[in-house]
Image (spheres, coloured by chain):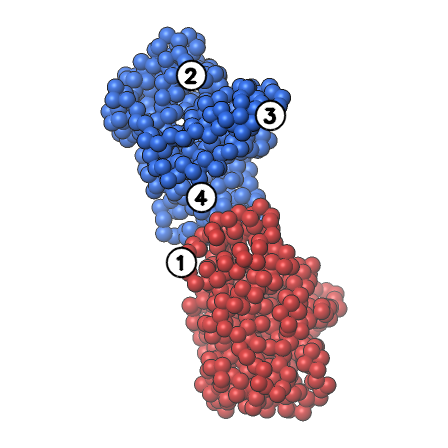
Chain colours: A red, B blue
Amino acid sequence: MRALDVVTAKRDGHELTPEQIDWFISTYSRGGEIADEQAAALAMAIFFNGMTDAELTRWTSAMIASGTTLDLSSLDRPTVDKHSTGGVGDKISLILVPLVAACGAAVPQLSGRGLGHTGGTLDKMESIAGWQPQLSPAAMVHQLEKIGAVIAGATADIAPADRKLYALRDVTGTVESIPLIASSIMSKKIAEGTDALVLDVKVGSGAFMADEARARELAAAMVRLGGHHGVATTAVLSRMDNVLGRTAGNALEVREALDVLTGGGPGDVVTLTLALAQEMLRLAGLDADPAAVLASGAAHDTFVRMVEAQGGDLTRGLPEALHRSVVTARRSGTVNAISAREVGVAAWRLGAGRARKEDPVSATAGVVCLVDVGDEVEPGQPVLELHTDDPSRLATVAALVTEAVDIADAALTPPPIVIDRID
Amino acid sequence: MRALDVVTAKRDGHELTPEQIDWFISTYSRGGEIADEQAAALAMAIFFNGMTDAELTRWTSAMIASGTTLDLSSLDRPTVDKHSTGGVGDKISLILVPLVAACGAAVPQLSGRGLGHTGGTLDKMESIAGWQPQLSPAAMVHQLEKIGAVIAGATADIAPADRKLYALRDVTGTVESIPLIASSIMSKKIAEGTDALVLDVKVGSGAFMADEARARELAAAMVRLGGHHGVATTAVLSRMDNVLGRTAGNALEVREALDVLTGGGPGDVVTLTLALAQEMLRLAGLDADPAAVLASGAAHDTFVRMVEAQGGDLTRGLPEALHRSVVTARRSGTVNAISAREVGVAAWRLGAGRARKEDPVSATAGVVCLVDVGDEVEPGQPVLELHTDDPSRLATVAALVTEAVDIADAALTPPPIVIDRID
């Protein structure tokens, strides 16, 4: 088989054969015979010509087969996980994983780091003193049995083809392809060994997909892929125009997650967490009331045990930034939006995110929203608080977010955070 | 500037800015900063989204600017060249270059080697004992002044960006893009320093472009590009369904060219050569009759002087293959076609062509057509003669060409070789 023939077949709109897909993915993953430029040309041809359902299923299977698959069949709890396509202030996993575990499921969440203006769950968890992201498969199974909750880093042997292909897509303008996104997400989640999966597909100006129709298309493709691989999958479409909750930044978001776990926290975070928990419990066949379990403190206990099992020590407190600066309202009126994208970029520039995957992140940097959508504000009133350990960044970032909080004369009714459910 | 932004702009259908084009071509040509996979992704995005006239003109200028340009302004003859998009049995340059020179022009033909089933002019010329393809710019100008005719290899400093990009396109399925083909051809021809150019754009099953509409589009793009760069350019569309002349192979085609230069040779070769010569002379502003000059023997004299100036010695004869084998007609009837593609592939497999640009070629290998389109044949009558120095190839190749000569009950009138002229 020749890489050139696979590229030209896709370029010319033909359906790739199962043999072509298996050969391309396994050979490219091993390295050597297929050049990066050939894989880039194929990815761009897929961007333009898409994939049929049969191609996408096989492509995803080949990505899974490029590495190892976790076997969670020995667990006596049903397994169910959640994946988010990425948003600003998205600390949902930190609450949802222990909550669903406290309801009786096992949640084997292998997570990633942030890139660009959206944060990563591992980066957030690492702001907890001593917490370690890496677990062996045996330690993961043990922790799932004992506590039901795991948040850990994916090891290099889970879907290595995706790791290589993602790095390539990132520099060749081929990230934004629905079949390539769907197969990238689902290959890792299916290889993780979960029986069921709920996808939080974000839509809006702060999300990877601003367009609802495309987000629906992505959600439907992933739900089908889960089904074809024996993983019961549903997707929740949720809004990502405003910051989720009131914080964006690593330690800042852990603190907010702890607020929700102890009965407080912002309403949008609670609403979305419970909606996702209900979907997960339904797929897991568990008849529990997540709101009651959250209120009982059981989810908080599970979070503490999960953190401790991975070396984390919450009694040492969360780190705080050395420098803070507020951004004030320039006029009076009602807050109609707090731009997730602008706040996300600000948090990133303050040190919370990375431009390249080798970059370190700051645990303390980020943005706190001092007002909510719907609040009345006066000129000069503080609306955002910037946190950083690097004071040289404050002035530039402050200039970036002068328009992040949209203040208008008339109050709009904010749309509900959950748009739809796709299964 | 970032390569990723250039790729995504083209991917999303935007027009690239002159600055983006200049930066991409010059940086990629130098090597280092832009990865091959990024250039491959851009080439595939161009395949799908094309280029505007302004983009294509700038892209071509940037390719020319990546290297040196020959200065032929000191010559007291008008300069005019010809380029063919490649066919099977296309030995036209060997006759046309000395013919147009003998009519008073200077023809500075920098040529290439063959790849795949179409031959290259340099490969053909190298079957002449002692002939050397490399000339310094000074030697080229001197030879043009003295003889008017040069066929030589392009040096590495003519449009080096094209050399690098072509090698990339060849392995990434991005050869077949009209703007990329047009810029590749025209950047080299414009850098060669000619005042005028005639393009022989081949159409048909044996050509790079089987589809006439696409061939017309390519021709029009190249004619416009020539005009934008001050090179008076016209294109002739010619048929490439049947083998051009009766031979495909290096020394075999030199012999056939010599037949035409001495007043013989196949009619289609003579017709196309004279049509192209008339276009070239018109662009050069020369009022000569190429048919009369060909008949006078002056073109033959010029060919001999051109060959000798580059070390070639025709008195030593042309090499001949050690092994020959005939293919016979399987039925009686009229020859309606001699498939250029099938004969081209056969000649290639017999050793006349190369699969990779590093491969050597055989001077002697090739195919001789023993019949013409329109001839009546009987079963068992020899129709093709295979030539090779490697007898192990004869049986496989003979099996490949059993259908190359199409014999039918009724004779079709073959269409004229010249389809149209575009300027």
Q: Answer with mark 4 or mark 3, whichever residue precedes in sequence.
A: 4
Q: Residue at x 53, y 21 (%)?
A: B377
| Residue with the mark numbered 4 | B170
Q: What chain does mark 4 sit on?
A: B
Q: Amino acid at mark 1?
A: Gly
Secondary structure, mark 2, is loop
CA gap, disc 3 and disc 2: 26 Å
Task: Judge depth for marks 1 and 2 and give the one in front.
Answer: 2
Q: Are marks 3 and 1 on the same chain?
A: no
Q: Answer with mark 4 or mark 2, whichever residue precedes in sequence.
A: 4
Q: Which quarter of the rendering shows the C terminus of chain A?
A: bottom right
Q: Image height check: is B375 above or below B173?
A: above
Q: Residue at x 65, y 87 (%)?
A: A104
Secondary structure, mark 3, is strand
Secondary structure, mark 4, is helix
CA gap, disc 1 and disc 4: 18 Å
The dot on residue B408 is 3
Name the foreground residue: B240 vs A93: B240
Task: Judge depth for marks 4 and 3 and give the one in front.
Answer: 3
Name the foreground residue: A348 vs B67: B67
Q: Residue at x 49, y 34 (%)?
A: B401
